[in-house]
Image (cartoon, rainbow, N blue to C red):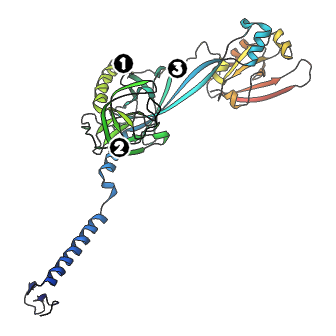
Amino acid sequence: MTRAEVYESETNGGARGHAKVLSTTPGSVRALALVGFVLIFARSTSLFAQADPASEPSVLAVAKVLPAVVNINTERVVRRTVRDPLEDFYARFFGYDRVRPRQIRQTLQSLGSGFIIDPAGYIITNQHVVERAADLKIHVTTNDEKTYNAHYIAGDDKTDLAFIKIDAKTALPFVSLDDISPNILGQTVIVVGNAVGYGSSISRGVLSAVNRNITVDDIDYKNLVQTDAAINPGNSGGPVIDISGRLVGISSAKMAFTPQGVPTQGLGFAIPADVVRDSVNRFKKIAQKQPEPKKQLATSDPSVSNAERLFGMQLQNLSQELSRALGYTEGRGVLIVAVEPDSPADEAGIERGLVIYRVGQSEVNSVKHVEDLLGPVQSGTNVTFAIGIIRASGQGRQLATLTMMAR
């Protein structure tokens, strides 16, 4: 019998449908082993080929949490008093008591993340994302691109956590705080949020340490968890989760440099989930005691003129002395002494030193007259102005008619 005669198939005779081993040799054992290896390799290759990325635990965890993650955009208007050469000119010729301090209004914006923790629309985020909320407009964009106005409920500077709420007609997806991550060193963690303004941004790493105390941007953080997953501006307030979709913590800070100025890598920090859960329970008690926010008609700050509120212009009467000093025609118009950046007046190309001569069809020669004419104007209304310079000499007359929309 040759080595090739390892099996005698009884199927050839049609008697039985199985193979009978007649003899074994070292060569036959090697052949059997090779055949077995090929079969096992083929089967394992088939299994690998059938692996579906959509079934990965991290993918499932992100899909579970992402619908509840929101983008938080805040706007705050600040006022600054500044000096410029024109004010020095006023002071030199007319004394400081004649000069109204020039103020400009600037809109400051910040961007962060948060996540819904209750189907009624309650959201947890960082306090530093929505600080000074009484002066803020808080806009929340959900993962399905819907935008809501949010109102501030409560916050805590010590934990750097804040509680806000949006109102929706239907129940919202949320992250449960009933089952949080055990936070084991070395476990996989995923940072979800709006890194540098890019929505639905994901980064992945491990839980590097717990109970870290750090100071970043003059904020003292206590008992944080540390991760090497990338945390970038805009991630603040967003969730850090494990591969089961349970909450590990809230992204709070990234240490780019040590206190000694040494650059760092892979040092991101989050507020632990148990601290978040305790704070939310406390914030909910505060929310229960608060009355529902009432929609109120917008009221203007009495210290802000209509011209400034609607168009971003600060005005001053053109007195006889001031008109002569500037070389303008006396008794006509109102001087523009400041223009707010990015205001309707600024966008229209108006600069300080120009004069308003007409509002609508009415000639004006006092700030009070302008204010009276602008008093009934509502946001979104178009108003026509005649603005320019009419010099006393009659030469160099520059006058333009333009229309601005009240903001």
User: Which quadrant does the C terminus fall into?
Assistant: top right
Tell me the kind of residue under disc 3. Answer: Leu
Visible residue check, residue 100: yes
The vertical placement of 196 against 379, above or below, is below
Work out how far the residue at label 3 is from the one at label 2, CA to CA, in angstroms: 43 Å
**Residue 122 percent coordinates (x, y):** 36, 30
Q: How many marks?
A: 3
Q: Which mark is residue 297?
A: 3
What residue appears at the point 31 percent right and 36 percent down from the top-left corner? 209
**Residue 232 percent coordinates (x, y):** 45, 38
Earlier residue among tags 3 and 2? 2
Tell me the kind of residue under disc 2. Answer: Ile
Q: Which residue was labeled with disc 2?
A: 190
Q: Nearer the viewer, mark 1 or mark 3?
A: 1
Work out how far the residue at label 2 is from the one at label 1, CA to CA, in angstroms: 35 Å
Tell me the kind of residue under disc 1. Answer: Gln
* Element under disc 1: loop
Earlier residue among tags 1 and 3? 1
Q: Which residue was labeled with disc 1?
A: 290
The vertical placement of 26 against 67, above or below, is below
